[in-house]
Amino acid sequence: MTMTPSLHDDHSIRHRLRLQTLTRLRWLAVAGQSFTVLVVAHGYGFELPELMCFALIACSAWLNIFLSVRFPAAHRLPPLEATAVLSIDVLQLSGLLFLTGGLANPFSVLLCVPVIISSASQPVRHTLSLGALSVTSVTVLAFYSLPLPWYPGSDFEFPVLLIGGAWIAIVSTTAFAAFYSFQVSAEANQLADALAATELVLQREHHISALDGLAAAAAHELGTPLATIQVVAREMEKALADDPRFTDDLMLLRSQSERCRDILRRLSTLSAEDEAHMVRLPLDSLIEEVIAPHREFGIAIHVVRGETGSREPVGRRNPGILFGLGNLIENAVDFADSEVTVTVSHGKDRVEISIDDDGPGFAPDVLTQIGVPFMNRRNRLDREKAGGLGLGLFIAKTLLERSGAQLKFSNRTPPATGAHVQISWPREKMDLFGTSETH
């Protein structure tokens, strides 16, 4: 499975920051900055360049008004435009901090906020450029700024050592928080892609199941005109029976109408036949149906009956279980050297299926991450051999867990080699008839 370009394209919808989100945050910043300046200047009576501060705050408000007028509220900014807007926020906040004490101002830590926002939604290179601008601003503020507003008649001298500590704290906070935000966002995007693929698989299975009903409906609708054609054909045969010119054509018309009737009869009974013997699926039949497509690849697949202390479970046909087990079998066949063993057991409370292969097994460094989307069971060379990115295994795990299963992935106990996958369901999840011995 290959990644679609939209997953990594800078112009993908996930890299377009919603303008309304930024404007709301900026209005909140404008209100907070204005309130802080007023409290410091008039509440505490500290001396500060109030007019210059409000001029910078007005620039931020003007930018909000311009963007709101220029673009609709639902507009999403491309990465370059979003980075430019966030850069203006960094410069505006840096200007306010320059006027109010630089890194001695306790609000200097807010310089990391635009970088964190960018790391959660923008491509890495744009976030790095914004981070470089933020670090540059912090470095300049460490050396150059107006004094921290303080009580009239006294100056507050911030120790150089604390200035250095504030610089380190802001830079490290920016880097750590941005990296953490990026990781969380990337994992969320991967999960969203994988879940979308899972939904597509389920939709495909449901569409296939719906074809039987469509066939029956088509047969019903075509039955009436076909009956009319047959009546007309019989009348024509009676009227033209003595004319040898039409004998062959009439016989052909009648035989083909009979053939159409037989075809429609089979179509009309297809859904009913499926309902009779396909909705209820015994466990052994389920296993054989899952294994059958994988027997022609040169790998021996053995089915072993484990504990069978109760009647064989008979459950409803579940496309999710069929697809999930089939994917695990396919994965085992891909990596097996010569054979795959499927062990089936069922008791009064549990139904278990184990899948073992004699291949190299799961790599130790990825064993704990099995089922994470886009994480394969082996290294890059084996990934190329398997031709996948681990999404199939994630889909299988997700579908089986939705059916109530618990999955355990491990390697076989030495001296045996290979992978071991155990799938376990509560009995009631796999059996329409409970644990009674009679149907």
Image: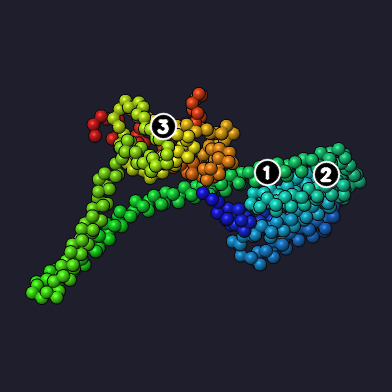
Near-viewer residue (383 or 339): 339
From the image, tell me which residue sits under label 2: 104
Near-viewer residue (363 or 313): 363
Residue 49 placed where, x, y %? 85, 55
Residue 268 placed where, x, y %? 24, 56
What amino acid type should be assigned to the residue bearing mark 3? Thr
In the rendered image, the vertical position of residue 125 relative to residue 412, given as above or below: below
Near-viewer residue (245 or 131): 245
From the image, tell me which residue sits under label 1: 179
Determine if residue 329 is in view: no
Tell me if label 1 and label 3 are in contact, CB under 8 Å.
Answer: no
| Mark found first going from the N terminus, 2 or 3 | 2
What amino acid type should be assigned to the residue bearing mark 1? Phe
| Mark found first going from the N terminus, 1 or 3 | 1
Point out the image quarter for the C terminus.
Answer: top left
Disc 1 versus disc 3: distance between alpha carbons? 43 Å
